Image (cartoon, helix red, strand yellow):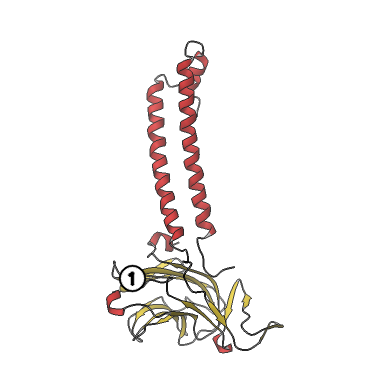
Amino acid sequence: MSLFTLGSAFNRFFRNELVDKIRAVDGFIDNLNKRIDNISQNSGNSIVELVDARKDENGVVHPNIKRRIDTISAFTTEEIQRLKKENAKMTESISASGIPVNAGAPTFTRPVTRIYKGRTYQVNEPVYDIGGLLIDPTMQESLTIPTTNILNSYEGTIEVSIIPFVLVDTVNYCRIDYPDTGRFLLFVNAAGRISFSIDEWGGASISTASGVAKVNEPFTAALRWNNKAKEYTLFVNGKKIGTKYYEQSKKGEFGTIMSLVHNYPAVVNKLRFSHIARPDRELIY
């Protein structure tokens, strides 16, 4: 399974469902128009068909067929427009997670062989366990992701699911060092407090309460930044934790490499990059 989500199965399913709804409503209108035309052409010979056309879904006959048809047409036209708008938003949401063809590939490295659960893994051969990729920097393992053409310092969102194997002060995830000073960082302390910061070392951060992160248990985090809104935001396990001030001109461009699991072992189950600052409704559950 690729670490990059290029448009989740969830999004594709609902997008297809919307398309099916639009087609169904379009088909209903076409059939209704054909039926009306048929009634008009054969009105002298088809009184039964005229009565049937006046019936609603409950079998109630409406004497004024024109008013009923006008009502149906107005409703279905409005419904089609609403569904088309939803479909357009879904398409935008899916495309915002696409990885450009000119983006660099993530690189997993381990300069030595490793024995894990009785199996020997060769040099640079990754270990998959607990539904994700195991990365253990204490075994000289690393997963680095080039940020060029993937992450934009003006706005974006990173969604990640992690199972920490160790909680100490301090475990670093999704770390990007700025070229001059400061860093972009998701970090967890020994007490299980999860924090997100785009600042200098020791600078401002957004944090959960203690005990949210637990050894061998997954947590999800969404890291969002938006220069237009002048803020960055942390979401953990579907809850909005808080926001801090962010101004791209003060921090500049991101460094060229992200270290996904920087200093202590963890499993990464899910990872999605978006070049838009995703709205709250997509990150809260």
Q: Is residue 224 above or below residue 121?
A: above
Task: Name which residue lies at 50% across and 63% down.
Answer: 6
Res 266 quadrant in image: bottom right
In the image, 66 versus 39, the foreground residue is 39
Most extreme residue toward the top is 44
Question: Quick one: label 1, few (<14), some, or many (20+) residues within 10 Å?
Answer: many
Mark 1 — residue? Answer: 154
Res 148 quadrant in image: bottom left
Kindly tell me whether residue 223 is visible in this rendering. yes
Q: Position of residue 63 (x, y in %)?
A: 41, 19
Q: Is residue 60 left or right of residue 112?
A: left
State the quadrant of the N terminus: bottom right
Q: Position of residue 96 (x, y in %)?
A: 43, 62
Q: Position of residue 150 (x, y in %)?
A: 44, 71
Q: Is residue 281 above or below residue 24?
A: below
State the quadrant of the C terminus: bottom left
Kindly tell me whether residue 191 is visible in this rendering. no
Most extreme residue toward the front is 102
Circle 1 sits in a helix, a strand or a loop, which is it?
Answer: loop
Q: Position of residue 260 (x, y in %)?
A: 49, 79
Q: Amino acid at mark 1?
A: Tyr
Q: Is residue 108 left or right of residue 183?
A: right
Count of marks, rendered view:
1
In the image, 169 versus 113, the foreground residue is 113
In the image, 57 versus 144, the foreground residue is 144
Task: Name which residue lies at 51% across and 18% down.
Answer: 49
